[in-house]
Amino acid sequence: SIAFLPDLVRLAEGQGAPVSTDLTGDTSHWDVVPYLADGAVSTMVTIMQGCDNYCAYCIVPHVRGPEISRPSREVLNEICELAERGIREVVLLGQNVNSYGKKEGEISFPELLRRISRIRNIRRIRFITSHPRDLDRETIGLFSEIESLCPHVHLPIQAGSERVLSSMGRGYTRKEYFGKVEDLRKARPGIAFSSDFIVGFPGETEADFQDTLSVMEEVRFDSSFSFRFSPRAGTRAAGMAGTVSKEEASDRLVRLQTLQDRHSQERLAACVGKEMEVQVEGKSAKDPDRLCGRTPCYKTVNFSPVTEGQEAVRRVRIRSAGHHSLSGEEGGPRG
């Protein structure tokens, strides 16, 4: 199995000669032991793979196959082991985590979150990615129920035009998306949002693009990932009429990213003067005398420590906001 690959590498390094790399065997991809860097406090845990949605532009279902959920027992056991190894934050991974367990008769995604929240020493739980259509009221309600569930949701909308959303096969409307955002904000005031956008989708007009910008103005995402449409062979969108020129799509991407930059700066600036919990992830890349970490809302903070020790979480007073991160001074350890 590929799970043995690290041992094979070490063996080859030790004996200075080729070794057999027969990776066949019964071990599944779920059994691969995650690598943890020294001092790591956060790691990702895959809970499912594949996708059943077949959005018009997406190649994932074609190359990764249908949704398969990992047994909850394995997920929980792995997280327990990770907690014993010093991990304090887990990020649950899946193409559409809201579909977890539905085909296998497993526990639901909300129940999985509840059980993870009971694991000792796991202080932060995140998950990516949620499909707006499948994010249900029970999951939304957990943001007011589970303190360790971080107040940050990545909720890809892709486009703001009803017509383009329908053409993409996304399965929800603008109104429905806004409803999910409103419900999440009620459940956890101050929750942060990030999203994905595609510009230049076949048939997208300037009016359609303006609808996308209006979504950004309405929600004011903390951050987003945005791309110019690129056809993928084998997807429905690859054969659609109404190609948007590369020049026009590029112009729209610049305008969208410029607006997002403004909103991101607003969100960061609003943090100045506040004291925040920062989970330390290591030394600052630009100044080794400072530490770097993240807030529960997933904002990067570089700060000057005033206490010695290995505390995973520090209280930091935010003094300034940069283009992509915050800067501050430690106010004391949290734990």
Image (spheres, rainbow, N blue to C red):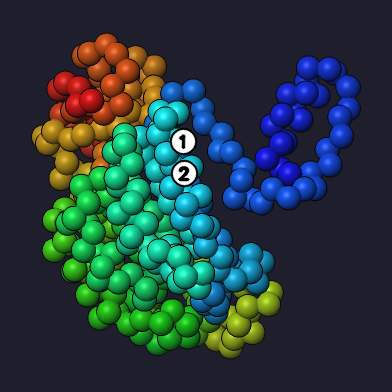
Q: What x and y, as percent, mark residue 184?
A: 21, 63
Total tally of numbered discs in the picture: 2
Left or right of 233 in this view: 280: left
The image quadrant of residue 197 is: bottom left
Left or right of 246 in this view: 260: left
Left or right of 299 in this view: 238: right
* Residue 298 shows in this picture: no
Looking at the rendered structure, the kind of residue marked 2 is: Asn
Q: Count neighbours of disc 1 (C-alpha within 10 A) and say few if under 14, some if 14 to 19, many if 20 or more.
A: few
Q: Which residue is drawn at 78% across and 23% down?
A: 11
Looking at the rendered structure, the kind of residue marked 1 is: Glu
Q: What x and y, as percent, mark residue 198?
A: 46, 69
Q: Disc 2 versus disc 1: distance between alpha carbons? A: 6 Å
Q: Mark 1 points at which residue?
A: 81
What label does residue 77 carry, if any?
Answer: 2
Q: Residue at x 77, y 48 (%)?
A: 25
Q: Are marks 2 and 1 in contact (CB under 8 Å)?
A: yes
Q: What x and y, as percent, mark residue 124?
A: 30, 42
State the residue in front, 312 or 75.
75
Q: Which residue is drawn at 16% across and 53% down?
A: 190
What label does residue 221 carry, if any?
Answer: none
The image quadrant of residue 269 is: top left
Q: What x and y, as percent, mark residue 318?
A: 17, 32
State the residue in front, 180 or 232.
180
Q: Count neighbours of disc 2 (C-alpha within 10 A) and say few if under 14, some if 14 to 19, many if 20 or more.
A: few
Q: In the rendered image, which quarter contains the C terminus?
A: top left
Compared to 275, does 146 lie above or below? below
